[in-house]
Amino acid sequence: MRIEDTDVERNRPELVEGILEGLRWLGIEWEGDPIYQSQRLPLYRAAAERLLASGAAFACYCKAAAYAGGDAATSEEDREGEGDDEGTKAYKAAPCPCREFSDAERAERERAGAARAIRFRVGREGVTKFEDAVFGPREVQNAEIEDFVLLRSNGIPTYQLSVVVDDIEMQISHIIRGADHLSNTPKQVLIYQALGAAPPVFAHVPLILGPDRTRLSKRHGATSVGSYAEEGFLPEAFRNFLALLGWSPGDDSEFLRTNELIERFALSGVSRTNAVFDRATLEWFNTQYLQKPPATDLLPFVEQELRRAGLWEGSQASRDGAWFARAVDLIRPRTRLLGDFTTWARAFFTDDFDYEAEARQKFWKDERLPAMLAKLADALEGLPDWNHDACDAALRGLATSEGVKAGLLINAARVAIVGRAVAPPLFETMVVLGKERVVARLRRALPAVSAR
RNA sequence: GGCGCUAUGGUGCAACGGUUAGCACGCGGCCCUUUCAAGGCUGAAAUACGGGUUCGAUUCCCGUUAGCGCUACCA
């Protein structure tokens, strides 16, 4: 785990913790403590000096951002506006004059105390090649590559330098990263060569775009991994969804649990086309993971959700694991996000719940209901055995004797017992909730039913 | 502007010279269900455009267009 924090301006330590937290949630593990590039500056400086000594690099005394010519030196703000090319002037980066300085010229700047950056001396001719595991053989004209900065005048390395130095030092075998780095890879290959190291395997993967087809960013709303955790997505569902963005197992499989993903993944299946992040598909995966795996896989996540909502302490769920599993199993076919367990399914975990307005309107209309529900409570209370069929028979028997359809009672009772129109099947719910609670809730609801 | 990458339904992927162009999400319909989901069946929906190569192009080549990326003393 390496934190590439060499941009002094933008680096914010708080953000790093969020990133690590997100990765942990995703289930990405790493060895040892994270390595912070900002804490191993001497390593990069030494490499830069070595390149300077060998002639692969040169000292540049230009004012920061002066070279690279006109437009490239524009400030961050100016860059925001570009995009429509009407205002952009065509130019070819002029070579940095410092590149050809004589010893005397250099000494003169040093004496004057001019700030010194170190740039890579890119060959004027020839090509730089490398093989990308996804995009295939790559070749760029060296003339197209500018004399990029390795070490800033403040002594901090740029990404290009630090990343190569670290990858060599950490013995990285495969560099798998976003395709936005494809164009810069030749620069890094040049550094590997100058440093006398063999380049690793490069594999560039397509970018993830927002619905508007621009690179995913804060503008698109929830973009940090953490926000999906908060929203109630399951990490495994997120992994499955993400894995299929830009990669395919080669056949039609969609639901792939993490062990299968790991087993089947191959660089050869990675696509070269950017993919649009589709929230609806992510939600579909979440429902799949909420429903298909054994309920026990889900329990820790539901527990966490109940704790978050303050419904865990002292609850039956916390005391009786088997009951908890049964309740979750009953509820989960109708869930989409973890939050569903504490919103519409709240009544399964606490007696403190409301009757949903729409449910009351829809199912408590009939004026005979208060009387019938009272009778239902009595009938259920008198049941010797508490199981699905007994509850079913008791309710249907009452419906028959009252001359109403069972559905009327079923729907009304459901609202009385769990407060919602959308809920699991009534009799299974009764069994899980238990006779005492069901009878009590039925009686407790009576005034509200009459009011309706 | 320069250089590069990409291009299959609205979205994510299959088909890697010969298929009625397949699957999934989403959308519509039907079934199941006295709630709502899930599930099953089903419908609409695509090879960006133009040239080649080939007996035959989604597939190979070229061009156009579009999108994206890089072109920073950002990563």
Image (cartoon, rainbow, N blue to C red):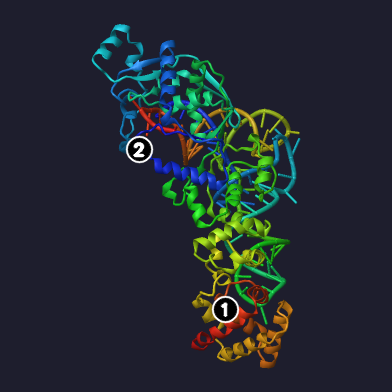
Disc 1 element: helix
Amino acid type for the residue under numbered disc 2: Glu
Amino acid on which disc 1 is placed? Val
Residue at 35% across, 38% down = A82
Nearer to me, B2 or A114: A114
> SS for tag 2?
loop
Q: In the picture shown, does residue A371 fall above or below A348?
A: below
Given the image, what chain letter belongs to the residue carrying mark 1? A
**Residue at x 74% of width, y 79% of height:** A389
Whether residue A216 is visible, yes or no, is: no
Q: Does A391 appear above or below A23?
A: below
Badge 2: how crowded within 10 Å, few (<14), some, or many (20+)? few
Q: Residue A111, relative to residue A162: is it above or below?
A: above
Q: Quadrant of residue A100?
A: top left
State the residue in front, B13 or A448.
A448
Residue under mark 2: which chain is it in?
A: A
Q: Is residue A147 left or right of residue A382?
A: left
Q: Which residue is mark 2?
A: A82
Give left or right: position of A50 versus A428: left
The percent coordinates of residue A370 (x first, y second) are 56, 89
Above or below, A165 against A332 in this view is above
Horizontal placement of A80 versus A132: left or right? left
Q: Which disc number belongs to residue A223?
A: none
Q: Which residue is mark 1?
A: A415
Q: CA distance from mark 1 to mark 2?
A: 58 Å
Q: Residue at x 54, y 69 (%)?
A: A344
